[in-house]
Image (spheres, rainbow, N blue to C red):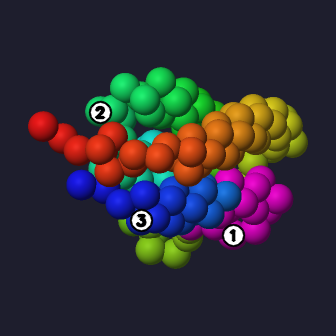
Amino acid sequence: MLNKTTVLQELNKAKVAHTRWVKRAEHLIEGFPVDKEFIPLESTSCVFGKWLYEGSGMQLRINEEFKEIIEQIEFYHDALHDNYAKIYQLYFIMPEKRSLLQKIMTFNSKTITAKEKEEALYYFGLLKKNSKSLLELLDRFEKKIRATSSFDKITEVD
């Protein structure tokens, strides 16, 4: 059974992790050295994704009261990872194109052209819009959890 306080704490940690993930993507575009491992590509690999797909987000999904909003959260989370994947392809050398020396000596990054930078900024703009929508949904979700008076009964699984 889930505890409301624990769920709210986990949700807050997931929101903070998401914000950090977006900031790391921004650092990449601004030209700071960023190891690709610090910005997970897959939506299930980041801290927020782990909360959504393995943690209390997944457990709350089974309840009809929370199912719709969690599906909306998932939509925006997946969309921003899709946009990041396009940025990733611009900034990082794809694994099959890396030499052994590149694997040892670099952060897996490559030099990008002005056109590629412009394209990355476009995708980052989309990523930020998805992030904003995601954070707004998370705020609504938090309010919904707080307003649920019989939380323990809601999260019981038969």
Q: Residues within 10 Å of mark 1 (few under 14, many from 20)?
A: some
Residue 83's place in the image compared with 91, above or below, is above
* Mark identifier at residue 140: none
Q: Is residue 103 magenta?
A: no
Which residue is labeled 1 in the image? 33
Hey, which quadrant is residue 96 in on the image?
top left
**Tag 3 secondary structure:** helix
Q: Find the distance from the CA under tag 3 to the CA under tag 2.
A: 18 Å
Q: Measuring 33% from the left and 40% from the top, which residue is drawn there?
A: 154
Which quarter of the figure is the N terminus placed in? bottom left
N-terminal of the two: label 2 or label 1?
1
| Residue in front for this viewpoint, 66 or 45 | 66
Q: Is residue 94 in view from this perspective?
A: no
Q: Find the distance from the CA under tag 1 to the CA under tag 3.
A: 35 Å
**Tag 1 secondary structure:** loop
Image side of residue 113 versus residue 51, left or right? right
Q: Is residue 136 in view from this perspective?
A: yes
Which residue is labeled 3 in the image? 6
Q: How many marks?
A: 3
Where is residue 95 shown, x and y percent of the image?
42, 49
The amino acid type of the residue labelled 1 equals Pro
The magenta span reads: 20-37
